[in-house]
Structure formats: structure tokens, C-alpha cells
Amino acid sequence: MRATLLYQAGDVRVEDVADPRIQQPTDAVIRIVAGCVCGSDLWPYKSQPLTDNPRHMGHEFIGVVEGTGAEVKSVKAGDLVVVPFTYSDGTCEHCRRGLTTSCVHGGLWGVGGVDGGQGEAARIPWADGTLVRLPVGEDSELLPDLLTLSDVLCTGYHAARTAG
């Protein structure tokens, strides 16, 4: 599959990488149908030192579930899903309190061997705690609007709420 990789500041390439596969029974694999570039992608774009292990880019995306591990219960093949800013198990103390970005088992997209959202497909760790099934199909004209649910809408809501 093709994916966007960051080798160092200013050096972004679209290259062939291994297809994602189920590694844990809690994983899903999705085919990405919409993604975008976030302002926070600019930080590594401007500052990442040269590396032999490029970073997979992207954390705002929507996809169609292609397959799931044996323990995944909330989504199935064919479901259209939005993928939040981070992945999370949905069960730890932080997740139960709504603080999924602090999940003890979760993490960031594109680092530590986890796919990013600017590619053709991605493995989704902790699929039940991470993926949110959408009530429309992948051909919906709402996709650009629904894509904002992955990060920017949530960030804007948090900013407005914090500001009162």
C-alpha cells in the first residue's frame, strides 16, 4: 500500500509500505477513504530530525472496516468509521473518565509501529475503544463534514468550552 512518510523536517514522501494486518485480537484493519492534514502535523514537518525509520503521517481519517480481530465487537467489515485523534482501549480508568488521550494502553498514530491516517489503509489497535461507527455509507456527501469529528471539531469544542 502507499503511505505518507516523514523522514526529516521538510522531507515528506509517498512510498510503498507493508499492508496492515491484524496483529492482536483487539485490532481492526480499515481502508482509508478520507483524511486530512492537521495543523499539528506541521510541528514534526518543521522540526523532525533525520531518521532511518520515517514517521507515518496523519491522525485525522475515516475508513471502511476491512477486517477485525476475534475480540472486536463494536464494528464489523463494511462499517464506515471515524478514527479519533489517538487510539485507546476504552476500558482503563482514564478512558472510563472520558480522557481517552491519556489511555494507559493507547497512543499516537504514526509512531511506534502504528500506521498513520495518510495512507491507503491502517491497522487500528484497540478497535472497540477507538473506532466510532458512522450511520452513512462511504459515498455520503457528508464525508468532509464527518471528517471533522476525528480531531478539529473536538479541538474547537474544547477551546470554546474552556473559554466559556
Image (tube, helix red, strand yellow):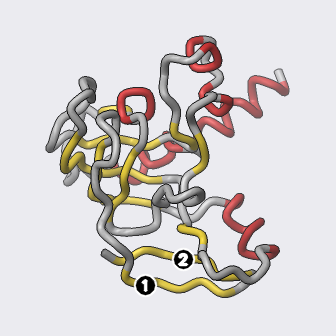
Q: Residue 21 falls in which quadrant of the image?
A: bottom left
Residue found at x 82% / y 21%: 164
Residue 121, image x, y percentages: 32, 62
Q: Quadrant of the N terminus?
A: bottom left
Disc 2, SS: strand
The residue closer to the viewer here, 71 or 99, is: 71
Look at the picture and state if 21 lies above or below 101: below
Residue 32, image x, y percentages: 32, 59
Look at the picture and state if 57 lies above or below 11: above
Q: Is residue 147 left or right of residue 95?
A: left
Question: Residue 5 has which mark?
Answer: 2
Disc 1 + disc 2, Cβ < 8 Å: yes
Residue found at x 61% / y 35%: 154
Residue 109, image x, y percentages: 55, 53
Closer to the chain start, of discs 1 and 2, is 2
Q: Residue 45 falls in which quadrant of the image?
A: bottom right
The residue closer to the viewer here, 157 or 32, is: 32
Question: Residue 123 has which mark?
Answer: none
Q: Is residue 78 left or right of residue 129?
A: left
